[in-house]
Amino acid sequence: MTNKLDDLASHFQHIIAGLGEDPHREGLQNTPLRAAKAMQFLTQGYRQSLEVLVNDAVFESAMDEMVVIQDIELYSMCEHHMLPFIGKCHIAYLPQGKVLGLSKFARIVDMYARRLQIQENLTREIAEAIEMVTGAKGVAVVIEAQHMCMMMRGVEKQNSRMKTSMMLGQFRKSQATRTEFLTLIRDR
């Protein structure tokens, strides 16, 4: 791990120098190492697995109605510009004899969010992971986020938000089920 950290720090030092700064000046002396540690943290999802994360926290249950987990904060990094996107994730599933421990939903969101990617893929990955782990009759995921690559550079649109959704199983097949979910998560 240290060798990779040292390599990352060296790259950040080159980036700082490439920007025309002196990486040895007082305020920047430790920046390459701090930036390397931050990047490792922001991409820790690559070093996690769904099986270890869930850790057998799937429990038998007679619950067969919709379960909604709303407003899960997420922080991710756009794979195109390596700038953050920040938002929230709403998840629903229709259990089929099994429910997932509540905190595992946030952990699943974090695991996939802590990788370089686009929001569209993040939405799909979360939905498919929950479907696989729970065997649910249906899974729905909606993510709404603000993208720094659109806010800080390029078109610089400060109030723009992107919304993505993925509907699997009954949420895709049944308009009524989908509408119930979307009504439950609608801005209050």
Image: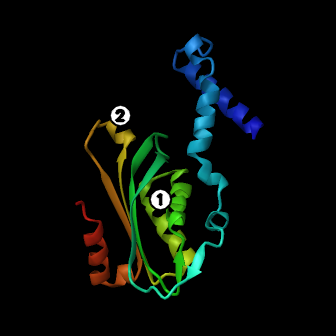
Place of residue 170 in the rendered image (x, y in percent of width and height, measured from the top left): 39, 83
User: Disc 2 residue type?
Assistant: Met
Name the image colouring: rainbow
Secondary structure beneath label 2: loop
Residue at left offset 47%, top offset 69%: 127
Give the residue furthest to the left: 188
With 177 as the anchor, is 128 left or right in this view?
right
Give the percent coordinates (x, y) of residue 24: 63, 13
Quadrant containing the C terminus is bottom left
Label 1 secondary element? helix
Q: Which residue is mark 2?
A: 152
Specify few, some or many for label 2: CA neighbours under 10 Å numbering under 14, 14-19, or 20 or more. Answer: few
The structure residue drawn at horizontal position 39% and vertical position 40%, both measured from the top left corner, is: 149
Q: Position of 93 compared to 175: left or right?
A: right
What mark, if any, has residue 122 been given in the picture? 1
In the image, residue 32 sits, relative to residue 21, either above or below, namely: below
Tell me how far mark 1 sits from mark 2, CA to CA: 22 Å
Which of pointers 1 and 2 lies earlier in the amino acid sequence?
1
Q: Is residue 53 above or below residue 86?
A: below
Name which residue type carries label 1: Leu
Residue at 51% across, 72% down: 130
Q: Residue at x 63, y 35 (%)?
A: 37
Q: Nearer the viewer, residue 77 or 188?
A: 188
x, y (%) of residue 119?
42, 55
Q: Which picture quadrant has residue 157? A: top left
Q: Position of residue 113 (x, y in %)?
A: 51, 53
